[in-house]
Image: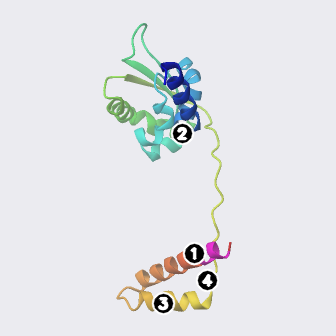
Amino acid sequence: MTDAKKQTSNKSYRRRKPMRASRLTTALLAPALRRQGFVQTEIITRWPHIVGKDFAENVAPIKISFPRASRNSGTLLVRCESAFAPTLQLRIPTIIESVNSYYGYLAIVNVKIQQGPLPKKKLRPSSKPLKPSGQIVRQVGSMVGKTKSDDLRGALQALGEQMLAKEGKKRKK
């Protein structure tokens, strides 16, 4: 087989290969995020992991500004609700440390706060608890048996009933 045929056959094979959605979104977001100073897209996509869920709910990264011809010692611009700004001001050293430890070098030295509304998050509808049949209730009750703690027995009973009810629902489909 010639080199040209090998290259074309490899390319066609790669096209049919499944890709992770994260690879696709990173490739699509990278040019837009670079214009805002985000050299790597991870600060946006992994923000809750970097700073923690309590900060991620109330703070969003907006832009990173670096000194000319440098990719370290930058300034991170974040947006937060007005009521959360005093708390955030006290936690700036923690955010700087978290971001720098994630990147592994001194990427950020300063954080500026911009007060304003954060984008609304779409809430996923919660699934309603299924109503288990009498047979499922008796079956789970015999599995759980007697325990010293009534709270534990009730929690195990409810969990078992929901699991078996979901399993029964899947079988019917």
Residue 166 picture location, percent across and down: 59, 74
Task: Specify the amino acid type for callout 1.
Answer: Glu
Residue tagged 4: 132
**Type of residue at label 3?**
Gly
Q: Is label 2 in a helix, a strand or a loop? A: loop
Q: Is mark 1 on a helix, strand or loop?
A: helix
Q: In the image, which is nearer the foreground, mark 1 or mark 3? A: 1
Q: Residue furthest right?
A: 173
* Residue at the extreme front of the image, as rendered: 1
- Tell me, yes or no, whether the two marked residues, 1 and 2, touch with CB atoms within 8 Å: no
Q: What residue do we see at 55% from left, 88% from top?
A: 137
171 left or right, relative to 148: right
Name the foreground residue: 149 vs 84.
149
Depth order, front residue of 82/11: 11
Magenta-span inclusion, residue 113: no
> Dot 1, crowdedness within 10 Å: few (<14), some or many (≥20)?
few
Q: Give the range drawn in magenta.
A: 168-172
Tag shown at residue 167:
1
Magenta stretch, main secondary structure class:
helix
Instruction: Let me know if residue 169 is in the magenta part.
Output: yes
Q: Mark 2 points at which residue?
A: 19
Q: How far apart are marks 4 and 3 (CA)?
A: 12 Å
Looking at the picture, does residue 144 appear above or below residue 4? Answer: below
The x and y percentages for residue 120 are 65, 43
Q: Residue type at mark 2?
A: Met
